[in-house]
Amino acid sequence: MSQSATRVRDLCSLLGVEQPILLAGMTSVGTARLAAAVSEAGGLGLVAAGRLTPEGFGTEMDKALALTSRPIGVNIPVVRDTTLMQGMIAAALQRQVSPIILGGGNPAPWAALILKAGRKLGIVTATPEQARKAEALGASLVVVAGHEAGGKAGADEVGGMVLIPAVADAVSLPVIAAGGIVDSRTAAAALCLGAAGVQLGTRFMLAEESPLHAETKAAMLRAAVGDTMIIARRYGMARRMLGTPAARHIAEREAAASQDEMIALLAGRHSERGLLQGDLATGMVACGQGVGRIANLLPAAAIVHEIAAGIRPVLAEAAAL
C-alpha cells in the first residue's frame, strides 16, 4: 500500500468515516442540516459554533445528531471571551461529537479540556510552525488552508501548492488540506501533496442543503476565478470575499479607516445579510477562489460521492503519464 493510501486509510479510521472529505466549519453555513448530509454521505460534517451562543450551538449539535447516526464533528473559533469559550467547549463535551476543531486563535488554553474528556482535537494552522505546536499540544489532526481559501486569510498569503506539503513534512499528524478544493482533480492533487484528507468550504456552500440565500448561490455560480478579493490586510484581519459592493467599499476605505471602523465594517451582520438574506449590495460573502470552478448546485451527498469516485481515476491517469 502506498504512503498516500495509508494516510487516507488511517484518517478515515481515526474519524470513523468512509471518505476523507470534511465539511469546513463555516460560520452561518455549517448548520445541522448540511453537516448531517455530509456525514450521511460518508464524509465528516462539522457543525460551526461561530456567532452562536453556547445554547444555540448545543441545539444545532442536537439537531445534527438526530439527523444521522454517523460521526459529527464541530468547529469552534477561538475568541478572547473566556466565558463564551468555556460555554462552547462545555456544550461540545456534553454531546457525542468528535473531533473538536479549534481555529482562529490560540488553542493552547482549551486543548487540555478536550483531550482530558477523551475527544479528538483538531487545530487549524496557517504555517508549519503552528502545525508543530498543534502536534505538541496533542492534536489528532491539523487543518491547513492555502491562500486560495475563503474567509480568514493567513498573514503570509502562501498558496496550497507550497503550504500543504510544507505542513505535511513538518508533522507526523494527518493533515487536512483546504483552499481551492472543489472537485476530484483538486482533491487528488492535495493527497499527492501529502494531505490525508480534504476540507471543502466553498463547494459545500453550493450544496442544496446549504442555508445560503438563492440569490447568493446564483451570484456564486456566476463568479469567475478572479471574482474574489482579499480585504482588511491593514489591521491583520485579512479575509477572502466575493467581490460584492460591500467588499469593494471596505477595500476602498481600508487605507484611511481606523481599526474600530474596520471592525464595524467587518461585523457579522454584514456577512449574514450577504449569506443568508441574499443582500449582495450591502452584504459580504466569504468564499474561495475555487468558486469560479463550480458550475452547479448538487445535494451534499452527490458532491461527496462525485469527488470520492473521481479521485482514483485521476490518480491512475497521472500514474500512466
Image (spheres, rainbow, N blue to C red):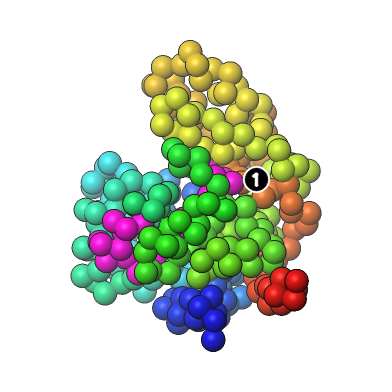
Amino acid at the residue labelled 1: Gln
Quarter in which the C terminus is drawn = bottom right
Q: Is residue 139 magenta?
A: yes
Query: Does residue 88 appear left or right of residue 257 in this picture?
Result: left
Pick whichever, 3 or 200, lies toward us.
Answer: 3
| Depicted 18 relative to depicted 173: above or below | below
Question: Residue 134, how many percent across, how many down?
Answer: 31, 59
The structure residue drawn at horizontal position 53% and vertical position 51%, both measured from the top left corner, is: 162
What's the residue at 36%, 74% (across, down)? 96
| Residue 93: quadrant of the picture | bottom left
Residue at horizontal 75%, vertical 58%? Answer: 297
Q: Where is residue 114 shown, x and y percent of the image?
A: 26, 65
Which quadrant of the figure has residue 272? top right
Depth order, front residue of 130/29 = 130
Residue for badge 1? 289
Q: Is mark 1 on a helix, strand or loop?
A: helix
Q: What segment is highlighted magenta in the picture?
A: 130-151
x and y percent of residue 35 in the render? 54, 65
For the N terminus, the image quarter is bottom right
- The residue positioned farthest toward the bottom in the image shown: 1
CA neighbours of label 1 inside 10 A, class few (<14), some (14 to 19), many (20+): many
For the question of whether residue 32 can be seen, the reply is no
| Residue 100 at x, y percent in the picture | 37, 64
Q: Is residue 176 above or below residue 43?
A: above
When the figure is inspected, residue 264 is found, relative to residue 133, above or below; the finding is above
